Amino acid sequence: MTDEASPCVVILVALILAILNSSSAQEDISYWLQKGQDSFKSGSLQEAQGCYDRVLKIDPENASALMGKGEALAMLGRYKMAELCFDLALKSCPEDARLWLAEAMVNERDGDYIQAGVSYDRALALDDRLAEAWLGKGNISLKMGDYNESLFCYENASRLGAEALARAGAIKTLLARGTSLLKQGMLEAALESYDEALEMDPMDPGAKSGKAAVLVAMGQRLLADGRTYDAYRIFENASSLDPENQDAVQGRADALVAKGNALSNRSLFSEALEEFEAALSLWPTNSEALAGKEAAQSALQAERPKITARLQATPKTDYNYYLDRGIEEIRNGSYERALENFNRSIEMDGGHAEAWFFKGQALFRLGRLQEAATSLDKALEKNQSSAEAWALKGTIQLRMGRYRMAALCFDSALRLDPNNSTLWASKAAVQSELEDYEASLRSFEQAARLDSNNTAALLGKGSLLLELGRYHEAQECFEGVLSRDETNATALRGIGDASFFLEDYDRALKSYGAAQTHSPRDVGSLLGEAQTLYALHENASSLQAFNSVLEISPQDVRALVGRGDALLALNDYVSALSSYEDALAQDPGNIRALVGKGEALRLQGQAEGAVQCYEMVLAKQPDNLIALLGKGDLLSLQNDLAGALIAYDQALALDAKSIRALIGKGSLLLFNDRPGEALDCYEKALAIDGKNVRALLGGGMAFLSQCDYSSALKYFEDALALQSNNSQAWTGKGDALFGLKDLLQARKCYERALAIDSNSSEASSGMGDVLCAGGDCGAARPYYERAIALDPRNARAYLGEGNALCAAREYNESLQFFASSLSLEPNSVDALLGKGLALAALGNNSEALLCFDKIIALDPENFAAWSNKGCLLATFGNFKDAAFCLQRALQQNASDETVWYNLGMVHYALGNYNQSASCYENATKLRPDDAAAWLGSGLALSRTGLFREALECFEKAILLQPQNIDAWYNKGLVLVAQRRFQEAEVAFQTALDIDPGNSVANYSLNLTREYLNGTM
């Protein structure tokens, strides 16, 4: 080697060929369409939009891409842009009913109801079987006040299979129509609308409150017409429908006052006083009632002598006659007639507690709780020793939510009748409401001791034990009921609930099924079955079961939340979100619904909305595991390392075995170049679930990051044993084998990965790496290019393309790819090395040196950086620092012949000939066929005066390269030094034969001949 820079060039080329990575591909319409659909289904709306844009760059009129993009934009709330996409698609596909439907739905969301109606009509004209179109048209007809058209549309939608949504829409329409008619004073028609709504859903709160408002208006008309009793009955019905309706309460009070006034006018002051007192119990500040009560009391005081005389003249049998008739009417279920008889009995003799007690019972049966309580107070005024009166008063107080008062009443009853099992069970129910659970259990047990056949006591105790989490004891209670009545649906459901919490899902399903056999519309057992199927991950069956609950009870919050959970598990995030929102409309603070909504939004890429949901949950429940996990996942996506780690650690503090938290934390740490900590998370996850594929893949990636290729290989093989068609696992296995230098097997793995998923950017990168490492960088480039097209953020692919271009000596072109790789991974040692080598090859040594310095700052033990830095410093003539760098390189890898050669050259330049000779000797030991190393060794040895050893080196070089001029020339010199002039003459002559113009060889030859001729 004559050029001192040539060893550096050798190193540059060798290292370029050894650097690994990946590349990209050609754009493919079908591929981008499929990727867009997959992204949309997974909730990655921005990514889906980007995929469809790639198609539209190739084919601007592609209807499928326009429709897909429109749907993605609509989900993102960008309705105008979505409309534009659908309009463009319809230009090429005007007969596509689904396109018209999609445009109509966007028009509707954007509030353009007229245009939405036109689009729905076009869709239905093309295909009248589109249930979604009938639903949409029903919605806009409702919003535009065309109620009959709306109901017609919902009826069609229901006929086509959308029963639940159509029923909900029809109910909304009937409520809106009822409200409109009520405002117009058309009360009968309004009442008819609300009744129709209640036929569809007897528990709909809007229908109940709406009907109550109509009844109030009717009652007010009747009251104005003097029809007091009819008015009161209607006001009472209104209150029953909507207890919060204050107009109904006031109407009842006004009707009672009117009745009291009418009775006073008939001199029935006692009855009038009762009506006024009842009015005041409803409306204590009613001035007319207060005045009427005072007047009635005054009149009674004045009339008392006359009344006493009349009662003395009345046969005693009359009192008992009406009392007995009233009791008989109660037995027959005729509570209004019973009440009339009790009033007659009391009118004859108001001093008997029995009549007041039975009057209270009749009022209780009629749902007139406050009046019933007043009547019982009268009974107890006259007889404090009536256990029955105290018990009934306690029951009424319990119904009214006055639990402490109810407890006092039951205590009074039990003092009078301590062995009454039913009273103990009632007291237990009140204690449970007061959250005095241990006392409640004792009361239930006392009830059971007194009467072993008290079913209510056993059921109550079982239900309380369920709430307390004492599931085995609860089962014993329910089994006790079933031993006497095997058809008791409540007990069967209780067994199911206890089994569910004990995770005995088979028994739970059998119990719920048995309960449904005896009570097919039992919501509790249907709901339990749905929740059990969900726990068994039978998500489709679970969804069907939740829908069955909602057919019976459309606004059941538990079923709405459960349906959302099942839809979420089935990856139907849009429908899941709708179900959670329906639940929140009924119960705005429902934690499970808020958590579910957050998850559905997160999985659709709506991070801001998801965070709001999680924060609302955590404000109420700081230890909510799912909210913490969701927050951690979102912060992780935003690469908020600190925030995400806090969330995951809080989750793990609550549940150290949370697989999701461990894997989420591991992935975050791995992404932030902390593979050791990440591996710890993955291994903990695998200790809990050794077959968790995500943990195996994450652990494999962590081992790859640590260059522990053997361990990585085992993890990926374990993952493949569980999922043989997992493209990511095949890619990881390929990477591990590549790291182990098994290029053939690595290539087979990448090929298998691509056969499973042709759109795997990482597998395409791996194929590029294998080909480039095998010396076929030209064949590698299409793989790198496809990898970049599939994933523009694949740093590995940019690096591979840059290396492939360097191998083709296209150094300028390579720099942009190294720059792209570094923009994604600024601390990538491989990308910095590739960039540095390319710059060095272009002669930009100072910039190249900066790259190598940055590598050393990141990785002080990096062999390639020290080696190449040493070469560059040598080209600058800075041999001392060059020697230091090359020695550092050899500390990392003493078996690299090229570095020994370069260090020998540097020592030679520094005049360190002994050290130079030693370095060259190491080089020749490592690579005996390197003629340049033998030549260098000979030069260094000759400088130390070891001419014989030097001669041997030159001869080795000549043996390897017979045409090596430098070797022949320097052989001649050492022969001269040994005064072997004739052999030297031959050596110099051979050099001239190879290069006749070599003036140095010619000069040396002439001098040698002069020695031989004796002229010197």
Image (tube, rainbow, N blue to C red):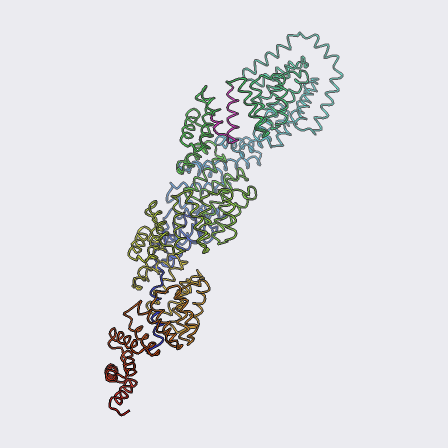
Look at the magenta stretch and give its main secondary structure.
Answer: helix
192 shown above or below 63: above
679 shown above or below 774: above
Which residue occupies 45% across, 20% down? Answer: 483
**Which one is in front, 456 or 248?**
456
646 horizontally vs 415: left or right: left
Q: Is residue 158 visible?
A: no
**Which one is in front, 328 or 515?**
515
| Span of residues in magenta | 454-475
**Which one is in front, 226 or 625?**
625
Q: How many marks?
A: 0
Which quadrant of the rendered structure holds the N terminus? bottom left
In the image, residue 665 lies in the stretch drawn in magenta? no
Q: Is residue 57 visible?
A: yes
Quarter-wise, where is residue 253 in the image? top right
980 shown above or below 569: below
Residue 62, x across and y down, in percent: 36, 55
**Which one is in front, 549 or 949?**
949
Q: Residue furthest right?
A: 302
Residue 813, x across and y down, in percent: 37, 68
Residue 132, x across and y down, in percent: 42, 42
Which quadrant of the rendered structure holds the C terminus? bottom left
In the image, residue 458 lies in the stretch drawn in magenta? yes
485 horizontally vs 58: left or right: right
Q: Residue furthest bottom?
A: 1015
Residue 151, x across and y down, in percent: 46, 37
353 horizontally vs 454: left or right: right
